[in-house]
Image (tube, rainbow, N blue to C red):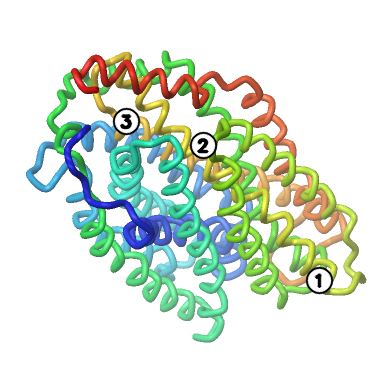
Amino acid sequence: MSEAAPHLGPVRKSVYALGDFTLNTALSALTIVYAQYFLVQIADVRAVLAGAIPLIGRTVDAFFDPLMGRISDRTRWERGRRRPWFLLGALPYGLFFAMMWADPPFHAAVPRFAYYVLAYTLMNLAMSVLTVPYLAIQPEMALDYDVRTSLNAYRTLGSMLGVFAAVLLKPLAESLGGDAAGFALAGAIYGVLISAPWIAVYLATFERRAFRDRPAESSLRESLLSTFQHPTFMRLTWIYIMGRIAMDLAGTLLVLYVSFWLLRPGDFELTMGLFLLGVIVGLPIWATLARGRDKSRVFIVGSLWWMSLSLGLAFVQPEWPRWIVLGYVPLVGLGFAVVDVMPWSMLGEVIDEDDLLSGERREGLYNGMFGFLRKLGGAIGVFLVLGVLDLLGYEKGEQQNETARQAIRWMTATAPAAFLLVGVWLARDYPLTRRRHHEILEKLALRDGKA
């Protein structure tokens, strides 16, 4: 771990963040636009089936993410374990994303449903080829407790810009006609947008030869079992699942909240833009607060902030002046930022602890598990929301019944808060503190014969 490595400065961190920009552009488009709007309003898929499409696709992907992680751990190419996959996965990723927005040449419900399930599944598999090595390279590039937080703050900034790009997909499609053909062309344009940056990511990232030369001898089955037997990882996993579901519920519901509760569909892009502005402003604040403090404590504070302000959305009325909502939403975004940054930063310390226990560097395996959870959390959130709304009468059209409107109102305010509360309870006595991580690094140094 002591060999010279390229300087991890702001420029390199920013280029690295382009990877999550592309990944979250796709993930957010699927959460914000695809299932509850495109599939229902444009592709004419029933709401409950639209919610089932991401759930099926990501369940299939569940078996591939950890496998991709272990493949990445055991790769021994001259160019590295992780970086070559960025070039191999970029083109299929963009092609299958475009395929998701195409209008299939058949009109019966079952074939259309099967087409979108297939397209969604293939896109997720291609995404995993990029996501798992991309996230696994983080702890290798940044070894320090606080530097990992900084790198993840940059990554999350790229992620939030991806959300903004996803929000713009719908206006782009509408400018191209707003019909199935318009969305198909917009999907193709975005396919190029999310493929091209991976060349830059490949050039900016780096790996450490000492990590690559370490043995990776355990089988996939043994490795998977060991992650479930790792108490710290399991605790962090559940913290992350709760936060991830809350994040995707918020993304799914906000467009419905603005369109059908506030009755201002034209305000959605502005509202989401201001929400993301709050997230971006919050990133350096939380990164600064995390210096010298345990990351779990910062996660708790940020989650409580988001919970309390999210509940206030239940009291907003459609007749209220626009400036109240537009001014309130960025405050909610401040707390949203920390829920993504901290768990990913904390995962690096879990991997170091696993190194001490197993003698292997298994960043790919652990990030594969986390990457799957990132996608599964979103699928569960979308399925729950659309399943409930389907029962309450949400359907294709600009007008919704009062029961559906009230459900959208209260779910937007309370559903994310409920999952955040569980995450806070799990994080209250998180064992892998800053002090514990320092002890782990000292033991690793002694084991490897380094001062």
Compared to residue 270, the image places residue 83 above or below, namely above
User: x, y percentage for residue 208?
Assistant: 19, 39
Is the residue under label 2 in contact with that under label 3 (CB below 8 Å)?
A: no
Circle 1: residue type: Leu
Residue at the spot of label 1: 263
Kindly tell me whether residue 104 is visible in this rendering: yes
User: Which residue is nearer to you in this view: 146 or 61?
Assistant: 146
Circle 2: residue type: Pro
Lower position in the chain sequence, tag 3 or tag 1 = 1
User: Which residue is nearer to you in this view: 70 or 361?
Assistant: 361
Circle 3: residue type: Leu
Lower position in the chain sequence, tag 3 or tag 2 = 2
User: Which residue is nearer to you in this view: 387 or 98?
Assistant: 98
**In this rendering, the label closer to the viewer, 3 or 1:** 3
Residue at the spot of label 2: 343
Residue at the spot of label 3: 365
> Which quadrant of the rendered structure holds the N terminus?
top left
User: x, y percentage for residue 255?
Assistant: 68, 63
